[in-house]
Amino acid sequence: MNNLVRKYWQIIVIAAVIVALDQWTKNLVRANIPLGGRWLPESLEWLSPYARIVHWYNTGAAFGLFKEGSMVFTVLAFIVIGLILYYYPQVEKADWSLRLAMSMQLGGAVGNLADRLMIGHVTDFISVGTFPVFNVADASISVGAAVLLIGVWIMERGEKKTKESAEENANTTINEVTSE
């Protein structure tokens, strides 16, 4: 048991915070805004064309894609959650970006899966411009993907610099040996 806690404590804490925030915000929207309704404080009404809180639901994937695919996405969520939990302990502790990305994606997957299992659809409420309406779980999955891409870019850049530095050192050594 202690070994499991040591392996998974970080991913569980991050994912749990995301799921709690996701479910709390969705419950606030469901309790206070009628389906199809919108809310924006009067003092921020000028923001209305750009950002607002709405009450919408989604039976498809993130951002309203593939509507009416709830059962498929429920099964996929279980598969993704299983894969993340399987691979997480295999990620090097130093690879913080991959660990964070996996944690965020786990939190997002669990948050939306909870909606699918409890109410049959996912509650969406963040509306920005003409972008599809989304929620905290969707945002977590998307930001997790961005963190993953940035992390891979940073690692590749570091590896490239290390390789270039090693080549420069090798060339310097060869020049020193040949000049003697």
Image (cartoon, helix red, strand yellow):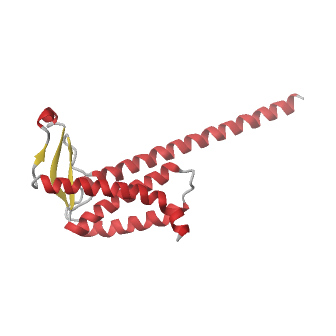
Question: In which quadrant of the rendered image does the C terminus lie?
Answer: top right
In this view, the residue in front, 165 or 147, is 147
Which image quadrant for residue 117?
Answer: bottom left
Along the horizontal axis of the image, is 156 left or right of 34? Answer: right
The x and y percentages for residue 33 are 12, 52
Q: Position of residue 30 (x, y in %)?
A: 16, 57
Q: Is residue 84 left or right of residue 18?
A: right
Residue pictured at 24% horizontal, 51% vertical: 134
Q: Could you tell me which residue is drawn at 36 percent across and 55 percent down?
A: 17
Q: Is residue 120 visible?
A: no
Q: Residue shown at 43%/52% (left/top)?
A: 101
Residue 45 appearing in the image: yes
Is the residue 40 above or below the residue 64 in the image? above
Vertical comparison of 46 with 38: above or below: above
For this orientation, the residue located farthest to the top is 179
75 up-or-down from 33: above or below: below
Task: Using the image, determine if residue 33 lies above or below residue 170.
Answer: below
Residue at the spot 45% in from the left edge and 51% down from the top edge: 100
Q: Is residue 42 left or right of residue 100?
A: left
Return the residue nearer the eye: 104 or 157: 104
- The percent position of residue 37, horizontal first and vertical second, equals 9, 50
